[in-house]
Amino acid sequence: MEQATTWWQVLVAILGALGGFECIKWFFNRKTNTRIALAEAESAEFHHLQETNEWLQKQLQAKEERFAEQTQLVRKQNTEILDLTTKMAEMEINHEQEKAELRIELVKVRCDDNDCPFRRPPNAQTPPKPGMTKEEYHSQKLLPQ
């Protein structure tokens, strides 16, 4: 008994042989394929982490530069404040010295005689006497009458 093979049986046999070969190939390479897929995933994740790290490093560097600029500005302003405070203190000291010198000068020049025409500071009760100097007036006052 001879059986006649038809074209579709030949086709099924060829496809079965090829499919069986692929099945065997998959069965023996499944661990390798898993390792390859895992390695590719880890490589992609590492690449992403590396890019993130570089971006964060740039951000940190930019922040450090801004911090350095701000620190420099604060130090400059503090120096200016100290200089201005020192100048203001010197001006206040000079002003107080000038006031004290003027008070001393006023004491030297002040006349306690209310009627004195050379009184410094003058008042409304002391009309000036023409033709007389301060020394002449005081010498007349000191002479007993």
Image: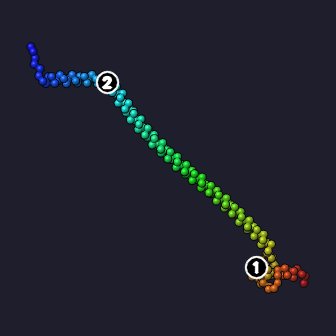
Q: Amino acid at mark 1?
A: Pro
**Residue for badge 1:** 122
Q: Position of residue 71 (x, y in %)?
A: 57, 50
How busy is the neighbourhood of tag 2: few (under 14 within 10 Å), some, or many (20 plus)? few
C-alpha distance separating marks 2 and 1: 121 Å
| Image coords of residue 39 (percent x, y) | 38, 30
Given residues 22 and 93, the one toward you in this image is: 22
Which quadrant: the N terminus? top left
- Give the label on residue 133, or none: none
Kindly indicate whether the residue at mark 1 contacts the one at mark 2 (C-beta within 8 angstroms).
Answer: no
Residue located at (45% from left, 41% from top) = 54
| Circle 2 residue | 29
Left-right relation of 107 to 25: right
Up/down of 17 relative to 56, above or below? above
Q: Could you say which quadrant of the image residue 114 lies in?
A: bottom right
Q: Quadrant of residue 38?
A: top left
Q: Residue furthest top?
A: 1
Q: Quadrant of residue 122?
A: bottom right
- The nearer-to-camera label among 2 and 1 is 2
Give SS at disc 1: loop
Residue 102, horizontal then vertical, whole percent:
75, 70
Element marked by disc 2:
helix
Q: Residue at x 79, y 72 (%)?
A: 107
Q: Is 131 or 112 nearer to us in this picture? A: 131
Amino acid type at image mark 2: Asn
Which residue lies at the image location 68% right of the left edge and 60% below the top edge? Answer: 89
